[in-house]
Image: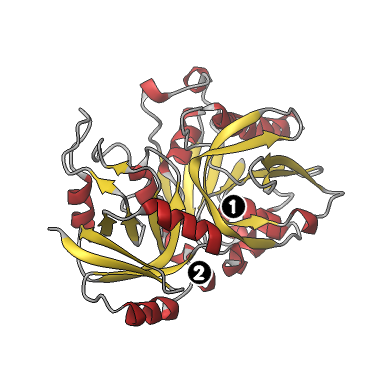
Amino acid sequence: MRTDALLVLEDGKAFDGIALGTTGEVTGEVVFNTSMTGYQEILTDPSYKGQIVTMTSSHIGNTGICAEDPESAQPYVSGLIVREMCDVPSSWRAQESLPDYLARYGIMALTSVDTRSLTRHIRTRGAMKGIISTESHDVARLQALAAAAPSVSDLDLVREVTCRAPYTWEEGTAPEWRLHGFHHLPPTGYHIIVYDCGVKRNMLRLLVDLGCRVTVIPATTSASEALALRPDGILLSNGPGDPERVPYLVETTRQLIGRVPIFGICLGHQVLGLALGGRTYKLRFGHHGGNQPVRDTRTGQITITAQNHNYCVDVDSLPSGDVEITHINLNDGTVEGLRHRRWLIFSVQHHPEASPGPYDAETLFRYFIEMIQETRKG
């Protein structure tokens, strides 16, 4: 069912549209994503908890929904904004249309929106809270509701998306998707503990492809509980919100440093930065999309990466004698990766498992395994 609706940002800027999926009112932080494909992975990425995602690509939904593609068990976005949404998918893999999928999970989508204008506004004014309503067209009322809504920066969203109990993960990627010879490697048998801050399934699949035993644990698990599982390595996963809202995980990470090899991704990268004595700050409109160029400072290699984050590690806050900056974002010069010079620790801000076209960032998972192998040589 299509219903007239209105998007109002907390600064009073309003956009007309047509609601799909469900009706009512929904609030969230409005951000934009520049990916042309991968909307199903975006919808089910727990890192988008509390956010209303605007897709800059003008036509969304033409490949429908496939049960093999979600990055988690459900969509986590608060809402979806598009210029045009396809009702009838044309892909042979499609099992459901995007509007039907959104309706099934009660996610509100807004279509027929001038997403170019909205994106330009966010780039100029910064990401901000907003509300989508099918119940009212009173801009002043909706602006007040948007401004009064809880801010993502003030919430511990990791507790809302993390698993409730430890579990094992055994599924690898489908053979036709395995790259870089992962499936030619002999099983390592390494036991990898994954702190679930909102982990994406493909991270777990790639670890399985590398022959690892994978155990996923809640983000609230203490260092002693994690070490009792006898891990060969620890992965700090991606997740939503401000890294400073998870001080318990920062302290746990601090206690794990030097005890076991650690690999951090996205929020996990930011948590490592805080645990190593650094600071984080909020970007104006974040990095969301599959076209972010990142340079390896050691080799000069440029990688096109997928990203989804609003916060960044402050390069000047890190102890330069101990921490090396390994990757830089070529768009704005922000930190995209770091490693410790003495301990077996490294992290990246982007998503090496997401494969936005190029797959070269996936090799970071192999590097993690090689790092663990170094501990065995010692």
Q: CA distance from mark 1 to mark 2?
A: 14 Å
The answer to whether 154 appears left or right of 256 in the picture is: left
Query: x%, y% of residue 354?
Result: 47, 37
**10 Å neighbourhood of mark 2: few (<14), some, or many (≥20)?**
some
Pick whichever, 86 or 184, lies toward us.
86
Q: Residue at x 22, y 70 (%)?
A: 134
SS assignment at label 1: helix
Q: Residue at x 17, y 50 (%)?
A: 100
Q: Quadrant of the N terminus?
A: bottom left
SS assignment at label 2: loop
Pick whichever, 316 or 240, lies toward us.
316
Query: x%, y% of residue 99?
Result: 20, 50
Q: Which labelled disc corresponds to residue 229?
A: none
Residue 42 seen:
yes
In the rendered structure, which amino acid carries the disc numbered 2?
Asp
Pick whichever, 59 or 299, lies toward us.
59
Pick whichever, 292 or 297, lies toward us.
292
**10 Å neighbourhood of mark 1: few (<14), some, or many (≥20)?**
many
In the rendered structure, which amino acid carries the disc numbered 1?
Gly
Residue 44 seen:
no
Disc 2 marks which residue? 156
Q: Residue at x 75, y 53 (%)?
A: 315
Disc 1 marks which residue? 268
- Way the structure is coloured: secondary structure
Q: Residue at x 55, y 55 (%)?
A: 286
Query: x%, y% of residue 231?
Result: 59, 44
